[in-house]
Amino acid sequence: MDLKVILVVVLATISFICAKDTTYELIFSDEDLFSACPDPAPGTLDVHGFADLSELSTTLGAEGMSISGNLTLLWDIQPQDRVKAGIKLLYFDRGTWTPTFYSVTTNDYCKGFYDPKLPWHMFVYRHVTNLEDVKDKCITPGTKIIFESYLLSASMKMAKLREGFYKVQVTYQAFDQNGTERPTRICWEILGNLQEVSNV
Ligand SMILES: *[C@@H]1O[C@H](CO)[C@@H](O)[C@H](O)[C@H]1NC(C)=O
Ligand SMILES: *[C@@H]1O[C@H](CO)[C@@H](O)[C@H](O)[C@H]1NC(C)=O
């Protein structure tokens, strides 16, 4: 899997569903964490077009997912590009993936990307050991993001949600300075089974 942006995003994704009332556990079905999006538009790359995850280790154990190693960004965009990113949480409702309220789109992903005030910081960035080196690079290809070894706690506080199968879908599009979209875009998904642990 990937961490940096990936994990970053992945984890970022998880953090967006944080809220107040109930504790849930998100159970990942697979150590491979990332799937390709179904029916992708032409030019769509999955997570392997986004980053080289070969040096990133994700291990699923009783305690959750442990993460260590590093990842290198691969997506062929230019440093000045504007990146539009979206994170959507979908629920599997009677055979159909249905959007939920948890959906975030940003038209300028790199602006404030490593801002420690942002909610995903606690899941991802604070585990990045070379944050000072990479924070201005956003998702420029060749950037290597190094993680300390940590346990991704999948327990979190959230607003009321139904138990069941969810997926988080992450998309990126890049636009050059004239506003023309780059020939490739990114889309990947993470599937999990959400179980309620306790009420507060
Ligand atoms: C990246 O991860 C690999 C595998 O864990 C490790 O061997 C390598 O030293 C790491 N590179 C850096 C720069 O941390
Ligand atoms: C933007 O458009 C101008 C004028 O058409 C062109 O010269 C320039 O190369 C374009 N820049 C990019 C990044 O495509």
Image: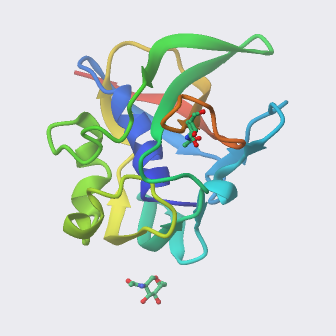
The colour mode here is rainbow
Position of residue 14 in the picture relative to residue 187 (left or right): left
Q: How many marks?
A: 0
Position of residue 94 in the picture relative to residue 116 (left or right): right
Which quadrant of the picture is home to ligand 2? top right
- Residue at 43% in and 67% down: 143
Residue sitting nearer the eye, 90 or 44: 44
Position of residue 101 in the picture relative to residue 115 (left or right): right
**Residue 183 vertical position relative to residue 68 in the rendered view, above or below:** above
**Residue 167 vertical position relative to residue 103 in the rendered view, above or below:** below
Quadrant showing the N terminus:
bottom right
**Residue 134 vertical position relative to residue 179 in the rendered view, above or below:** below
Rendered location of residue 79, percent (x, y): 43, 53
Rendered location of residue 77, percent (x, y): 56, 52
- Residue at 37% in and 52% down: 138
- Residue at 22% in and 36% down: 118
State which quadrant residue 50 falls in.
bottom right
Quadrant showing the C terminus:
top left
Rendered location of residue 10, percent (x, y): 47, 44
- Residue at 35% in and 40% down: 155
Residue sitting nearer the eye, 127 or 52: 52
Rendered location of residue 8, percent (x, y): 40, 50
Residue sitting farthest toward the left: 117
Residue sitting nearer the eye, 115 or 168: 115
